[in-house]
Amino acid sequence: MKVRVLAIVPSEAIADIFNEIKTKFPDLELDIRVANLANALPLVKNECKNCDVIVARGETAILIKKTVSTPVVEIPISGFDMLSSITQAEQLKMPFAVMGYDAMTRNAKRIKDILNLDIEIFSISQISDIESTLHTIKSKGYNIVVCGMGTANSLVHALGLTPINVMTSHATVEESLKRALSLGKIIVEGNDKTRFFMHLTECSGKKYIVYSRDCIQVFNTFNGDSDTAVQICEKLLPNITNERQYIKKTCNGTLYDIDQSIVKINEQEYVVFAFDTKKLIPAPKKEEIKIYSKEAVYSSFFTHFPQFLDSSVKTLGINLAFVSKTNLPVFILGESGTGKEQIAALIYTNSQYNNRPFYVIDAENITEKSWNSILYNEDSLFLQSGLTIYIKNIDKLNQTKLNQLNSTIFDSKTETRIKLIFSSDTIPGAKTNQNILDFINSINAFTILTKPIRQRPKEELLTLITLYINVLDEKYGKNVIGMNKDAEEMLLSYQWPDNLKQLMRVITDIVINADTTYIQASQVEKTLEAEKTKLTSSIALSSVIDISKKMSDIEKDIARAVLLKSNGNQSQAARRLGISRTTMWRLLS
């Protein structure tokens, strides 16, 4: 019988390493789950009965050992793993510190002593030390934290710090699986039939039906009617193989999620069907309102360096913490891809309402029925208290809807109970829609105008690119450490017409296709050439033209789209359209 190992890993990159190495261990049945320090424990509690050994890393392993009785093999962090992470941190040319449990920081201290490095190392002994240690690190002026992935969670981002997560090498994973196999064989040899069936009885959440190899039912944990489940099993039994199977069946409005496996107990084989059942509900229509908790905001909006966005706002002379705590509505204007959604999320996390939900409404996709429900339903969001409501793409609302929204805010005095945030795209060289300007003035909104990348300091852009390369390298396991000078200069001199969205896309393409430790200028040049094809006029036009508008309005939209394609150069845009500059100016006014 195979040794069942549950591997809890902190990233998809490490999961891929496990999948590569597991082929060397035919006696292992390896279940790999990606989970961080926050959600590993509930997962392990549910799954520990289905495994013989658990493999985990760092503080996650320590926490699991204290919680469950299943043996835990800890994945060590080698000196090579630590040296690679410190090297990446040095590439960023920003103050950084190392934080972790003794097992990790011991290696960091050895590297520091051998290489005579000037780095500060913080050792923690228990999970409760993490928050206070991070506050200490921030107070000392550090921007980067080299740490185990278990600590690279929402708390790190919430403090405006950026983690460099220590990766795990192939050799380390292989050694961990060897130890798990040795330990697991001892445990498996002690199993017997009684213990197995007791285990199934104690399992929460799932229901089991067990058959002998000659198709006789020997065990059933369904309480009450199991006829449908039995019928499913009996149809599957003739085609059962020795391979584990995951099967989905629907019957009478119920989804049966089935994990079928073969278990050998005392030389006798059994076919085990583990059932998860849930009632089916109709598929929802296109999502128009998204609701985020504070924790979900950190994981959804701040995956890429909140301090970069925060500094972006500060360069405009705006005290974001102060703005967040006032009753004034906030209106964010800026070109596409300049981080308007992330700034809205920053305002929420700094506001007095950050312990309540964050509602995001996309005005571009809202239906008439949903719009009326939002404004006029007896449970309308605008009649509640303590919420944060963010309406993006508000420029997509027609004048009637803008007037309705304005009246609702005024009549219900919404701003005294709810933090209101709005955003709208702008086009280089074009005037902001007058209806939007009138709306901003009517609600007395505090306005934030985001800067496009081309107007940001080059050192900030270089820091962002370097940090994102680190994130992608961790995700895809490419072993990219940095860029050469020519590649840097090429990226810094590019105009980035689609701003952060385009930057993230380009850097992702470069890292995925990288075949060297340092990104070369030739790689950057090839990717930027491909961008010229992607950023065609048809893409620009499709994003701004609504054929349901009047012809005069469509002409204006076309003029703005061509102006965007021309990087704000009105003379060039006019030549492309075959019109005079005077006509161009009239269309944009």
Image (tube, rainbow, N blue to C red):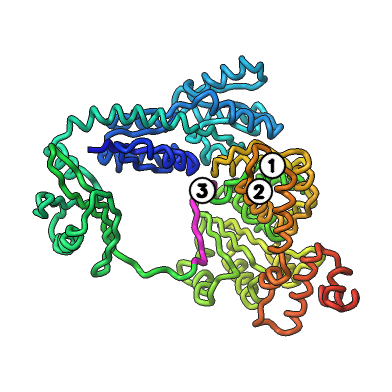
What residue is shown at x 56% (from left), y 64% (from top)? 361
Q: In this view, does 524 lie above or below 163?
A: below
Q: 487 or 406: nearer the eye?
A: 487
The residue indicated by pointer 2 is: 510
Residue 334 in view, yes or no:
no
Q: Which mark is residue 411?
A: none
What residue is shown at x 55% (from left), y 71% (from top)? 366
The residue stretch that appears in magenta:
287-298
Instruction: Classify 10 Å Cα crowding around label 2: few (below 14), some (14-19), many (20 and above).
Output: many
The residue indicated by pointer 3 is: 294
SS at mark 3? helix
SS at mark 2? helix
Q: 44 or 511: nearer the eye?
A: 511
Asked if labels 2 and 3 touch by Cβ distance under 8 angstroms, the answer is: no
The residue indicated by pointer 1 is: 519
Q: How many marks?
A: 3
**Where residue 88 appears, x then y in whole percent?**
63, 33
